[in-house]
Image (cartoon, rainbow, N blue to C red):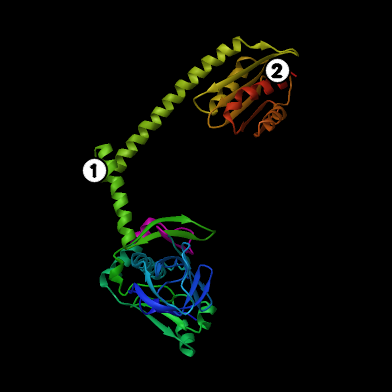
Amino acid sequence: MTERLYLDRPDDASFESTVLDVRARKVLLDGTLFYPTSGGQPNDTGFLGDARVTDVVEEGEAIWHVLEGDAPPPARGARVAGKIDLARRRDHREQHSGQHLLSAVLLETAKVPTLAFHLGAAVSTIDVKAERVGRELLSRIETACGEVIRKDVPVRATVFKGDDAAREARSLRRPPEAEALASPRGLRVIDIQGVDRDACCGTHVARTGELGLVKVLSAERGKKGETRLTFVVGGRALLAFQERQDVLDELSQELTTGFREIRSRMEKIREAEKASRTEAKALREELLLARATELAHGARTRPGGGTIIVHRLEGGDPLDARFLATKLVLLRADLLCAVAHSGEKLSLVLARGEAAPQLDLGKVLRDVLASLGGKGGGQPHFAQGAAPDPDRAKEALALAEAALNG
């Protein structure tokens, strides 16, 4: 069994311990300040002697330390000095205590329970039981968290065993897992004075003032009936604001306006862009209509009757192929046409006029695209689809022309 020194000494960075066992690059100690990955919180990192600890794994009551590099691990029975990455520990304490506070305030303010927690490398998340969590509610939650932080109330860890554990379990924000109640180490309860009581094995701050700020960055739909909240606390919250401030400053300079006017300026830009797109589309369609007229005059006679046109478009939009094919068969009722567009992928459109030979263009298109690794479909008179390689447009048109010529 490994004594979990981090529970009573969360502020300490250094310790000494005895090696109980060694398995390849894994070392078991009789006591450790290194927190193992558990309860949604990642492991600590640091050093044992000169070897870097990259992972800390919990196996029952034993905690194994995974060492980096090829240097021999310490021998069984040896005394070793350990040192954890205190900045990483401080960050994890802030995020984990911030999660307890955020979850407690969500439940108290909006009756929204927390279902899961994950502490990530840059941001943390909680999954909550709610179809939607709007920004207005999040603002109220953040304000309430801020009030608790400013009060700087104590955060205490207490261990209960036996009947005391069972009694305490009934007063917690969430019922503890059976494993926690049955642990020989007892039931560890984190108490944010006057705000929250919850069972937890993680590391936490001593007072809420250490958290600085709790900020929810986003709320996204998760599983049915659930929402995932992404949040940052303390140092991460400051970094998030600095990053966003840098973006706002750049936008303000680029748009030559104050940050409060960015939204209205962007709306004007969107309106101007929309008008430009509409105008560009109208001009493009005029050009395509002129090209359709020119192509229709030059349509080749088909051996089995009717006429045929195959044409390749580059630039513009894949929808141009559909527009051009539609216009061509309106200009010539006896026409069978194939129009390809080369963009990010190959788009192919087949169309026939009302008086053209009655080929099943849906089948023709599927056969052509199948040989190019693509797919598509449609009706006997009109079909469209795509293939992944835009450089095979010439090949696609050759195959289509052969099929349309019968």
Q: Residue furthest bottom?
A: 163
* Circle 1 residue: 258
Find residue 59 and report its horizontal and vertical position in percent. Answer: 53, 74
Q: Which mark is residue 356?
A: 2
Q: Residue at x 45, y 88 (%)?
A: 164
- In this rendered view, identify the residue nearer to me: 239 or 382: 239
Q: Position of residue 276 (x, y in %)?
A: 39, 28
Q: Amino acid at mark 1?
A: Gly
In this rendering, the label closer to the viewer, 1 or 2: 1
Up the image or down, 12 lies above or below 132; here it is below
- Which of pointers 1 and 2 lies earlier in the amino acid sequence? 1
**In front here: 107 or 387?**
387
Q: Residues within 10 Å of mark 2 (few under 14, many from 20)?
A: many
What segment is highlighted magenta in the picture? 121-140
Q: Give the x, y percent position of residue 100.
A: 39, 70
Three-letter amino acid code of the residue under disc 2: Ala
Q: Is residue 216 left or right of residue 2?
A: left
Q: Nearer the viewer, residue 149 or 130?
A: 149
- Left or right: residue 387 versus residue 199 is right
